[in-house]
Amino acid sequence: MIQFDEKIYFYLLAIIPVIVVLFIFLQIWKKRTQKKFAESTLLKRLTPEKSNFKSVLKLLFFLLGITFLTLALVNPKIGTKLETVKREGVDIVFAVDVSKSMLAEDIAPNRLEKAKRLVSEIINQLASDRIGIIAYAGQAYPQLPITTDYGAAKMFLQNMNTDMLTSQGTAINEALDLATTYYDDEEQTNRVLFIISDGEDHSEGTTSKAVDEAVEAGIRIYTIGVGKSKGAPIPIKKNGIVESLKKDSRGEVVITKLNETVLQEIANDGDGEYIDGTNTAKAVERIKDILLEMDKTEFEAKQFSEYKDQFQWFLGGAILFLFLDIFVLDRKTKWLQKLNLFNENHKEAA
């Protein structure tokens, strides 16, 4: 397990492409200036020891020095001791709708990004609860099993998109069936499922049965609606540019609408509550209150208790590369010339 003390220093890496661009412009300017001064053959005679390769090598050393210095400032730490600790919390599973309708932009930037932001903000409010993530469309897919690793949860969350599942459509019953198998701790009395969706459901006939089975398994179901009831078309994009709008079999533009009724029915039958996800802050605050009201169950979790600083290795690397940048000269190296690796002596004779 790796932790970073000061992530803000990663922004220093942004100067690397700037330095590369400035280096390229400097080389172009030098060549133009030298051409005005004399012909290339004459310049080679005037500066026979100058090496073009060395300037690139010095730049590489300098950039590596900056990179290692940045990593030293960030101070990565590696977990060295894993121990089992007692924690209290609730088991929470997020079922995120990744069907094509979630690309509608009636809520900025689109429904799916809004759903991911909601889940991320909820995770930020958690302390010791365990979480899992499910992605669903025409079928459900386990994205992250129950864990206390919030960092991993956010990473998996950000990678979710509408192309991750080949089976399209929206089958909420699939998400409910998979969620029922997620809670592996028999002693956990508080099991919570959050369904984040626009409410479109192509499995209405079996959803009610799936809800009943989830409730029997001790799961409380809360639904979070993303989108607007007036609806919006589904854009089809390529490289971030809208090429067309999704159309049905008759060639008419599909308008996808938030179906609050479906989500409210699922929440009511699931002994939970429907939450409007339009206002992120209000939705997260309401969810925080819901979780605080629940009884916490004690469980065991493994976590790293000791971390060791690793900045010294990167600091040493930075000093080494910056030292090489200073002491490597632009002149050709004599012993390398004698090796004649690139047949340069033959070229000069010719």
Image (cartoon, rainbow, N blue to C red):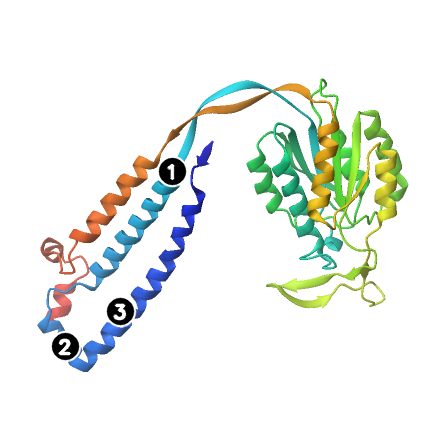
- Number of the label disc, if any, that sits on residue 41: 2
Q: Amino acid at mark 3?
A: Gln
Q: Amino acid at mark 2?
A: Thr
Q: Residue, x 27% and y 53% (percent of image)?
A: 62
Nearer the camera: disc 1 or disc 3? 1
Mark 3 is surrounded, within 10 Å at the Cα level, by few (under 14), some (14 to 19) or many (20 or more) other residues, namely few
Tell me whether the residue at label 2 lies in contact with that at label 1, contact meaning CB atoms closer than 8 angstroms.
no
Q: Image quarter for residue 157?
A: top right
Measured as percent of width and height from the top left, residue 271 is found at 84, 31
Give how far apart the Cα atoms at labels 2 and 3 are: 18 Å
Q: Nearer the viewer, residue 79 or 287?
A: 287
- Number of the label disc, if any, that sits on residue 27: 3
The residue that mark 1 highlights is: 75
* Placement of 66 over or under 316, stated as above or below: below
Q: Residue, x 69% and y 47% (percent of image)?
A: 280
Nearer the camera: disc 2 or disc 1? 1
* Placement of 71 over or under 339, stated as above or below: above
Query: Does dot 2 land on a helix, a strand or a loop?
Result: helix
N-term mark: 2 or 3: 3
Camera sees residue 162: no
Measured as percent of width and height from the top left, residue 115 is found at 69, 47
Left or right of residue 38, residue 216 in this image: right
